[in-house]
Image (spheres, rainbow, N blue to C red):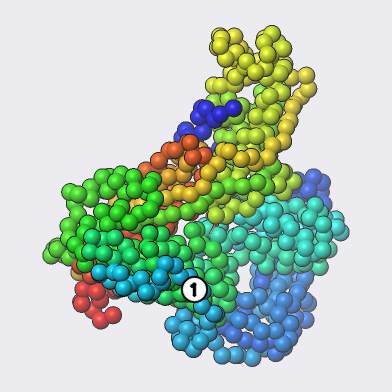
Amino acid sequence: MAIQGGVTGQRIPRLDAVAKVTGKAKYTADINLPDLNRYAGKPVWEKMLFGKILRCPLPHARVRRIDISKAEKLPGVRAVMIIAKEGAELRYAGEAVAAVAAESEEIAEDALRLIEVEYESLPFEVDTDRAYEKGQRGSPRVNRWGEGEDGFKEAEVTVEVTVRTPVQIHTPLEAHGSVVGWEAPDRILAFDSTQVLFAVRDSLAREVQLPPEKVRVICEYMGGGFGSKLWMHQHVPIAARLSRMAGGLPVKLILSRKEVFLTTGNNPDSVQHIRIGAKKDGTFVAFYRRSYGTGGVGGGADLPGPYYRFQHGFVEHYDVFTNAGPSAPLRAPKHPQAVFGVESAIDELARVLGIDPVELRIKNDPNEIRRKEWQIGAERIGWKQKWQPWGSQTGVKRRGLGCAASAWGGGGGPGSQAEVRIHRNGTVEVLLGTQDIGTGTRTVVGIAAAEALGLTPEFLRSDKFVVYIGDTRLGRSGGSGGSTTAASVYPAVYDAAEKVLRRLLDIVAQKLGVSADQLVARDGRIFVRDNPQKGLRWEEATKLLPTDLISERGEWRRGMTGSGVGGVQFAEVEVDTETGKVQVIKIVAVHDCGRVINRLTAEGQIIGGVVQGLSFALLEGRIMDKQTGRMVNADMENYKIAGSLEIPEIEAILLDMPERGVIGLGEPPIIPTAAAIANAVANALGVRITSLPITPDKVLAALGKVKS
Ligand code: MOS
């Protein structure tokens, strides 16, 4: 049956909205006794313990001696474990050294202070440029197409920019953390804040050498991850081991905000030397980029792009190794910084050629949908009426307009299994082991079932409709990454719902004396297609069930999803040339995501992406102290993220193209924001700030008012 759109594409408030705002929703840190016993199904535990991890204060060190005996003797301490043995090398400030479990958080903290560690301090480097110059880098990643650099010979104009972006931290509202207990000598119950429920289960099972079915992982509610919760973090097996040492008592181990900053991942920084060559009429010819960046002790700083059509190109990238925590994918990993580089260069080209920046982009954009989005966005921001040439203003406060584009995949795939149950009293239950990282997946799951069953939005939001997710006991589901969740779970749930509906239709058909294929389910009724008067209301139909409930399972299937989305954003900013402050006035964000499932949360994705992109443009950045090798702003006071005062009017425009199928939208809207804002600032001032974040000191330096 084709999707009718009775529920899909409407504006559906989150099914868990009330539970979240009233505090009824339990996040990992809210899990205590007796909840734990309730989940276990019997009173297994009388007490819960608190875990803490001792972390290395030095950026590079070797453990000379470690002594946990005093900590072990502290009353209330139930387990102490050494993670970095004597002789172990620690490569960044924040690496785990030892862990304790105690009867209270305070005792656990006291116990950490009683652990004696003697470190041998080793040479370190936390500065990306210096590490690069010293040769602390991997082999180059090179990509060449067309004639490579030789392609510039065909160019009539060449522009060059060098841009920099800082290391950014994911800063999800909810810290990483777990509660883990042994229900039996061979069975674990674990709660973890994660984007990959089943990967945590499988990884933990491997670590403790249990079969996966002996490990149950639960994450019913989650306060974001942005990519930093895409694998099992070390605290999970640590909590499991501490628990086992303490006779199986559950251990709650929630990371502090500082631990989140130092150890759970970050978005690598970048230095990008970019050159683009073009014909005088604006046709792009050649692209060159040489870049480096640090993913700390890991890699992963390479950049995508260039997004537009260049006949010739050469890109070369170096991962630089520094003594800092490893990187992790962050919402559209590395795309915002790559787009910032490319779009800065394109803007320079527009200025040099005297071509309108929007026209120049449309001329070189290979994507048809995006060419339409450029038109819509330009119209909504008032580009034609408001745009003025770079630096043509003279007042104290100067306004500017800028734009940039994005591209992303967002397709789904097999691996999700859902179950849908219909009860005789009309209640519908949907069960699927996916996690909702905060994007509204629980509601997407509900919409898929309600759509297939022909129920109304009101029924979906009533207490007769229940969605169970976030538990590995339910059907398997993939991780929430790469904006693939919606396109992975929607078809699986729809499939299950369609199958169970077929059974109900058979029963109704008998009652009405027609064949089942003459029946349709729509608007909360089941009726004869050619004679809509002849039919039953949902609850009248379900009353005919011979058993208390019927149930079917479904799987992902082809044909309902697509992939490949584009987006463009326009920014209007006002820059105060006396204070250097940039105020974003308005962002117009035009995006597509194939078939819109929930217009409300889809627009929410766009707004959220813009907010995070704006934050990256103007405020964020990890600051490392070169002398001590430590991060100096590892807290929410000194690591700046956008608050309500920074947020402008955001106009989210969503193209609905049902024929393209369901496509993910979580990541793309963060991609163009920083570039659009930076281009708007350059437009307002007539000078370009090529280093993010665009802070007042950089604005004043660019204007020649202070030294940089
Ligand atoms: Mo995303 S960076 O795949 O959570």
The residue depicted at 78 percent of the width and 77 percent of the height is 73
Relative image position of residue 560 (x, y in whole percent): 57, 38
The residue depicted at 68 percent of the width and 86 percent of the height is 63
Query: Which of the 4 image quadrants contains residue 190?
Result: bottom right
The quarter of the picture where the N terminus appears is top right
The residue depicted at 71 percent of the width and 73 percent of the height is 99
Relative image position of residue 703 (x, y in whole percent): 21, 73
Ligand 1 resides in the quarter of the picture at bottom right
Q: Is residue 166 at all visible to an observer of this figure?
A: no
Relative image position of residue 354 (x, y in whole percent): 19, 62
Q: Is residue 73 above or below residue 518?
A: below
Q: Nearer the viewer, residue 560 or 431?
A: 560
Query: Which of the 4 image quadrants contains residue 534?
Result: top right
Q: Nearer the viewer, residue 441 or 561?
A: 561
Q: Amino acid at mark 1?
A: Val
Q: Nearer the viewer, residue 663 or 633?
A: 663
